[in-house]
Image (cartoon, rainbow, N blue to C red):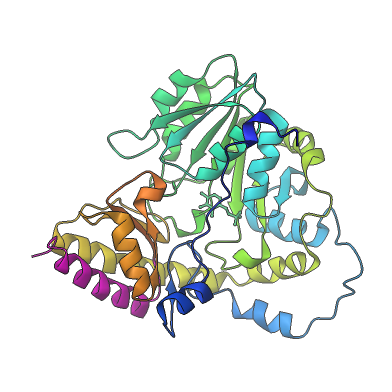
């Protein structure tokens, strides 16, 4: 086969072991998965109630313009319908952006560590990837990223809050950055965890896209809304930008059921508030653990936390899995000797931390 040169060495995304496979391998009855930043509380009960009583003609393609979902998201976000681009998850938006803008003649600038899909998609398009380490504040180093931009730069990625570290880039800093980025360079602001943010340095980002024609905001229903299974993400940009990206999108990329449930999920604002509060309390369980044991942690504005374990993260990951907890090893994310753990329910967090305390004590890390 005449594969693209760029695809030859690639490995498929490793989504972490499925729950059933782990159950079988370790003979466990119950598995707690805190690895992919899914909402441990699930989605709004209103969505579940709706799905029990639906009757669709599944022979028909979905609405390719996703009109009802579009109206609901536009009203919720406070933007014009024409400023929205929907993806089959924001993962698909990343691939649309890369297909439309990257080629072997271009480069793309991003932080490191950051969300792995930016790099993967850029590599597939043959673009040069310029990775800029986080600064001493553990934020995107926007000065260094600006310095990395040249005439061949096509896309810059700002992940705020950043995955896997969890911290935001202050909106004022992004504002200053945008004032200096050439207007023919697309700046993607990935806000997958925006609903969880509590840091007052995070101001509303809608004015950024209204002011700059080269800004695209990216959000998702996979995290706080607890709807990862439905694969819906959306981008917000000026109409002219959205119109250029839209032909690269698959024509029916959001399913009928996905389009039907999003307006319901958006209507349940109390549910998101409840999830935010439970998440904030759960985060404190991890912070207390780290402070008790003198372990470094990254301040998080998300539903996950990256913290130090002073031990081989692949080994501890394996050990936790054998005890029924699936997390992410920092080694796989470019942060060895750390774990990234999705904040679960109070009980899940307590159960996991008890196991982790035992593992690290046996390893001689904790006194
Ligand atoms: C989870 C995640 C996504 C992907 O979300 P989907 O909408 O489920 O594709 C995008 N960006 C970041 C930073 C994420 O953590």
Coordinates of residue 45 in the picture (x, y in percent): 60, 80
Which span is picked out in magenta? 343-367
Nearer to the camera, 119 or 41: 119
| Quarter holding residue 276 | bottom left
- Please give left or right for residue 330 compared with residue 276 in the image: left
Quadrant for the C terminus, please: bottom left
| Residue 165 visible to an observer of this rendering | no
- At 27% across and 34% down in the image, what residue appears? 136
Coordinates of residue 28 in the picture (x, y in percent): 41, 82
Nearer to the camera, 94 or 316: 316
Coordinates of residue 289 in the picture (x, y in percent): 21, 66
Q: Is residue 363 magenta?
A: yes
Count how many numbered circles sit on residues in the image.
0
Nearer to the camera, 332 or 252: 332
Quadrant for the N terminus, please: top right
Nearer to the camera, 16 or 264: 16
Coordinates of residue 2 in the picture (x, y in percent): 75, 33
| Quarter holding residue 82 | top right
Q: Dominant secondary structure of the magenta stretch?
A: helix
Q: Against 301, is 38 above or below? A: below
| Residue 226 visible to an observer of this rendering | yes
- At 14% across and 64% down in the image, what residue appears? 292
- At 37% across and 51% down in the image, what residue appears? 199
Q: Against 194, is 95 above or below? A: above
Q: Which residue reaches farthest top?
A: 151
Q: Is residue 149 magenta?
A: no
């Amino acid at each position: 086969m005449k594969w693209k040169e760029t695809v030859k060495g690639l490995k498929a995304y490793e989504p972490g072991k499925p729950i059933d496979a782990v159950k079988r391998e370790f003979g466990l009855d119950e598995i707690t998965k805190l690895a992919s930043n899914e909402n441990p509380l699930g989605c709004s009960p209103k969505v579940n109630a709706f799905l029990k009583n639906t009757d669709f003609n599944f022979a028909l393609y979905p609405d390719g313009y996703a009109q009802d979902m579009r109206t609901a998201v536009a009203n919720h976000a406070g933007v014009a319908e024409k400023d929205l681009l929907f993806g089959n998850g924001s993962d698909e938006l990343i691939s649309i952006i890369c297909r439309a803008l990257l080629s072997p003649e271009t480069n793309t600038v991003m932080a490191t560590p950051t969300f792995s899909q930016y790099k993967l998609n850029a590599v597939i398009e043959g673009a040069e990837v310029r990775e800029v380490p986080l600064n001493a504040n553990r934020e995107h180093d926007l000065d260094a990223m600006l310095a990395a931009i040249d005439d061949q730069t096509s896309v810059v990625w700002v992940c705020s809050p950043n995955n896997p570290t969890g911290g935001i880039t202050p909106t004022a800093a992004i504002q200053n950055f945008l004032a200096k980025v050439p207007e023919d360079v697309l700046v993607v602001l990935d806000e997958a965890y925006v609903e969880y943010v509590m840091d007052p340095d995070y101001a509303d980002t809608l004015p950024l896209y209204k002011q700059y024609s080269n800004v695209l905001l990216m959000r998702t229903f996979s995290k706080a809304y607890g709807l990862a299974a439905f694969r819906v993400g959306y981008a917000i940009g000026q109409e002219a930008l959205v119109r250029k990206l839209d032909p690269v999108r698959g024509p029916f990329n959001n399913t009928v059921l996905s389009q039907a449930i999003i307006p319901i999920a958006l209507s349940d604002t109390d549910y998101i508030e409840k999830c935010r509060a439970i998440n904030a309390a759960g985060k404190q369980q991890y912070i207390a653990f780290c402070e008790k044991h003198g372990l470094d942690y990254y301040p998080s504005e998300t539903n996950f936390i990256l913290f130090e374990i002073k031990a081989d993260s692949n080994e501890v990951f394996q050990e936790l899995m054998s005890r029924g907890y699936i997390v992410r090893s920092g080694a796989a994310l470019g942060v060895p000797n750390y774990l990234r753990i999705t904040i679960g329910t109070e009980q899940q967090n307590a159960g996991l931390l008890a196991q982790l305390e035992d593992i690290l004590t046996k390893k001689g890390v904790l006194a």
